[in-house]
Amino acid sequence: MALFGAALLTGCQQAQQSLSIGDMASAFNREIWVMSIWAIALSVIIFIGVSFALFYTVQKFREDKHDAPPAQFHGNNKLEVWLVAVPVVIVIFLSVLTVRSMAILNPTPDQATKIDVLAKQFWWNFTYPETTADAGGKVANGNELLMPTRQPVALTVTSGDVIHGFWAPNIGGQRAAMPAVQKTWQVDTDRAGVYQGNCSQLCGASHANMRYKVVALEQERYNTVLAAMKAYRAPEPAAGSAEARGLQLFLQGKPETGAASCAGCHRVQGTSAAGQVGPDLSFFGTRRTLGAGMWESEKAQEMLIPWLKHAPRVKPGALMPTYDGSEYMSKGKMLKGGTLTDAEISDIAAYLRSLKLPEEADYWRDVPVIGAASTGGTQ
Ligand code: CUA
């Protein structure tokens, strides 16, 4: 038991914080916890009772001193009724607890903040269906989920390809993301912070690289950020700047070298880029992660150029084409990407980095990263 316990506890290192199913800041987790305590307590009582009865019987009837046959159960109605009734009562009790918890956790109140979650190989899109951007379209963000604290948040989860699993243990629960099926349930947390989210269903080459961040903000701050997202229009780069050249390539690609446009797959709010195949890039410059949580902070900055040059080589199975002319595998086929020069790649990077929310709406600012010292906060 001690060895088994030690093996289990190795996963609980605080800094990893990816297995924080015991985070009591979430009403969802508290409910599950209470239910588990009942089930564990009853199991312990049964274990002690059965052990006691076993040892007692073995001890007491150790040796048959007389050759008389032992007394038989069969026909002892009283004992049989007890042996059936007690387990039935325990099972009914646990069922009632479970049904009660399900009734509390599954429905979502009308006033819950609604967020649509789309899972795809190998990234996430989070759309705010109640917030239409001034520039048109619903406000959306790739791989970084913003939610308010101290209120139920209704997540509607679906998939655009294979089955994925939405799992951010701190805010409660886990749901399969399935194509053509929409599942809604509520999550919540009382504590502002950045939490780790993962894909919990083996879904392909980059299953382990299909992560996201949950940024939980106090209501007022959440409102500020969402209002800024609603009002946001991608900045117009100054003529002749690197950003302007980047925007041009972003929207049109470079057909003469076979380099596909970024806009074919990605949306940027306030521009004509409205692609829905890849993650929403409207607030790319504010985001702290790259490659669906594969890299964070400085590492994400550093990886942007290699990412743009040949995403499938730095992230196995990524469906983005290469832009340095190299071959890559996409859905089982070898393809060859178009070609952009290093200068052009760096122009696109400059444009992407300019896609920033206003300073006061930087949702990473002053948000504690729960259980980790290495990332987030005000870095
Ligand atoms: Cu998506 Cu595993």
Image (cartoon, rainbow, N blue to C red):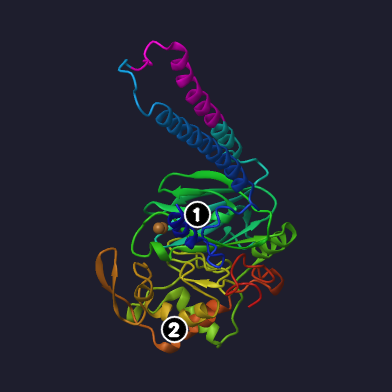
Quarter residue 239 falls in: bottom right
Taking the view exactly as shown, the residue that stands out farthest to the right is 220
* SS for callout 1: strand
x then y, percent, for residue 156: 53, 48
Count the labels in the image.
Answer: 2
Give the residues drawn in magenta, as a range.
Answer: 70-96
Between 282 and 94, which is closer to the camera in this rendering? 94
Q: Is residue 150 left or right of residue 242?
A: right
Between circles 1 and 2, the one closer to the viewer is: 1
Q: Is mark 1 within 8 Å of ligand 1?
A: no
Is 233 above or below relative to 73? below
Q: Is residue 188 left or right of residue 324?
A: right
Crowding near pointer 2: few (<14 within 10 Å), some, many (20+)?
many
Return the disc, 1 or 2, that comes first in the chain's sequence: 1
Between 379 and 180, which is closer to the camera in this rendering? 379
Quarter residue 244 falls in: bottom right
The amino acid beneath tag 2 is Ile
The amino acid beneath tag 1 is Trp
x then y, percent, for residue 275: 46, 63
x then y, percent, for residue 264: 43, 67
Q: Is mark 2 within 8 Å of ligand 1?
A: no
Crowding near pointer 1: few (<14 within 10 Å), some, many (20+)?
many
Q: Residue at x 55, y 57 (%)?
A: 20
Magenta region's main secondary structure? helix
x then y, percent, for residue 329: 28, 70
Q: Is residue 148 magenta?
A: no
Q: Which residue is mark 1?
A: 167
Q: Is residue 104 left or right of residue 206?
A: right
Q: Which mark is residue 345?
A: 2
Q: Residue at x 60, y 77 (%)?
A: 236
Quadrant, the C terminus:
bottom right
